[in-house]
Structure formats: structure tokens, C-alpha cells
Amino acid sequence: MPRNRTVRLAVLGSSVQKAAASGYPSSRSSALKRRIVVGGLVLLSLVLITVSFRSSALDGVQGTAATVLRPFEIAANRVARPFRDAVGWAHGLVNAKSENKKLHREVQALQLQVIQNEQAAAQNAQLRREVNFQGPPSIADFDRISTEVLTNPQSSIDQSVTIAAGSSSGIGDQDVVINPSGALVGIVDKTWSHVARVTLLTDQTSSVTSTDLRSPTAVGEVHPGGGNGVLVLDRVQKSKYVGVGDTIITAGTLGKGALPSMFPRGILVGTVTSESDTDVNPFKTIQVKPAVDFSSLQSVIVLVPHR
């Protein structure tokens, strides 16, 4: 090999080694600088957070930053709003379809129930005509006189109201009084020419023979339960079924006795709220929530027998 080539290779090799050797300190220096910068930023962030929490020195800076960034926030909300609305619309559409199917099934069930009830009522009326059945009086056997309530109960002891119609309107003692919804209010116990007094169902002297709408053989006496407007369905045999939520109605005349009930059958009394029995009591203990708010009566309907 020629001498000059050997010298050239030696010179090149030494320069490469020097460059390589000089590269390591440069890399270490860059890494160290990055660490110093990151550490400084972290320290600065901690300082700013501490100052922000402990003083109001940065409130102006924060307000300025919020003002500068506000247009970007508004723009981001405007861009994202259609997507949020689309997601909400899709979710609402799914829920609406599910609810629509549920309501459709319920409507179909109610329509079927109405048809069955109408068929049962028609068959019942036909059988009554064929056998010339004489049942207890119903609301349809009475005339109705609507009137205003002049005074409501003045105390828990006085469970009566005064109405703005009396004997001149055809109202008499012992006439049954209901509210506009058809629920039992009480009976007329005193009449004058143009006014009358009504004893409410919550009065301690009131009592009405009633029955469970779902279990007609569960018959007892409804009377006040001792305060708070609660009624009690008493003297119902333990063998009879009465459930919480059942509807209690007036029973009307029972059997073929000569003494008819002053209350026609089928007037709403209330809803069963509790039912229990004990070994020492031969009858069930049943509490009934009345269907009438006796503290705020405004108008009533008096059932007057056909003259």
C-alpha cells in the first residue's frame, strides 16, 4: 500500500474518533437541559397553583386568560353542539319508541277490558230482565241536586257542613250526599227551607254498610277510625279476602230484608290502606283512606229519591 494512503486513513480515523468522542458530551448536555427545563416548568406550575389558592394576585391574569380563550371555547361548543344534539335526539328517539310500544300494549289491554266489561254489563242486564230481579237501589234511581257548600267543619268535633239548598229544592232528611266525583260525603240530618246540614262520613255517629269491590262477600261497617280522617272497615270475617289498594263501596240493602238501606249500592267510599288480623279479634282490622277531602268541600250533590 502506498505511504500517502496510509497517512490519509490514519488522519481520517483519528477525525472520526474525535467526532464520535465529542458527540457523547453533547447528548448528555441536551438531556440535562431538558430535565432542567421540565423541572423549572413543574416548579413554576406549583408556585402558580399555590399563589392562585392563597391570594388574589393572579386574578387579573386568570381573567385575561379566560377572556382570550373565551372565543375558542364558544367556537368549540358550537362545533360540538350538533353532535351532542344528535346523540340526545337518538337517545330520545329510542326511549320514545320503547314508551310508545309500552303504551300501545296498555291501550290494547284496556280496550279488551272495556269490551269484556261491556259484554258482562249487557249480559247482567239481560239476565235481570229475564228473571225480573229486584236488586238494591243504585245511583240511577235517584234525582241529583247540585249545591254549594256554605261552611266546612269548624273543628274535629263538628264533622258537618252546611249546604245552600233545602226543603224548597226537594231535599229531605236522610238524603245521601256525594261529591262531584261520585264519592260518599255523608247524609242530610237537618233541613230548612233554603239550607240543610250534612253529617259527614267522618262523624263519630256515621256508619255505612260497605263491601270490597273485588270481593263482594267481604261486607262490613265503615265508621270513623278515631282521628286524622281515617276510616275503619269493621266486622269483616277473617275468611274473606281484602287486599291493600282494594276499592270500598257502599253495599246497599243486603238480603231480602224489609228495611232498605238509605245508601244506594256502588257509591265510592275509599281505598284500603292496611289489612291485618289477630287471634283475639274474630274480624279483620282494615283501614280505609276516604275518597273525599272533607276539609275543603266546595260543592256536593244530594241524591233525592224519585218523587
Image: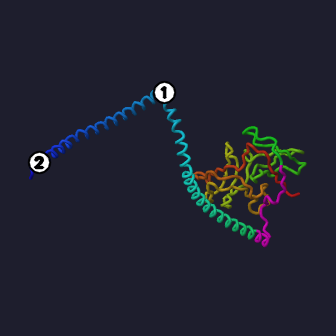
Q: How many marks?
A: 2
Point 84% across, 56% down: residue: 143
- Residue 143's label in the rendered image is none
Q: Please identify the quarter of the rendering in which residue 109 is found.
A: bottom right
Instruction: Report the colour scheme.
Output: rainbow
**Residue 127 inside the magenta-drawn segment:** yes
Q: Percent x, y for residue 175?
A: 82, 51
Tell which of 144 and 69 is nearer to you: 69
Residue tagged 1: 56
Q: Identity of the amino acid at label 1?
A: Ser
Q: Mark 2 or 1 closer to N-term?
A: 2
As helix, strand or loop, the secondary structure at mark 1 comes to loop
Q: Identity of the amino acid at label 2?
A: Asn
Magenta stretch? 125-146
Q: Is residue 305 left or right of residue 278?
A: right
Q: Percent x, y for residue 93?
A: 59, 58
As helix, strand or loop, the secondary structure at mark 2 comes to helix
Q: Percent x, y for residue 51?
A: 43, 28
Point 69% across, 57% down: residue: 211
Residue tagged 2: 4
Tell which of 207 and 130 is nearer to you: 130
| Quarter occupied by the C terminus | bottom right
Tell which of 283 and 293 is nearer to you: 293
Spatial distance from mark 2 to mark 1, Cα to Cα?
A: 76 Å
Tell me if mark 2 has few (under 14), some (14-19) or many (20+) residues whose alpha carbon lies within 10 angstroms of its own. few
**Residue sitting at the far bottom:** 130
Q: Measured along the vertical axis of the image, is residue 296 above or below residue 237?
A: above
Tell me if mark 1 has few (under 14), some (14-19) or many (20+) residues whose alpha carbon lies within 10 angstroms of its own. few
Q: Percent x, y for residue 302?
A: 82, 51
Point 80% across, 41% down: residue: 151
Point 70% across, 46% down: residue: 224
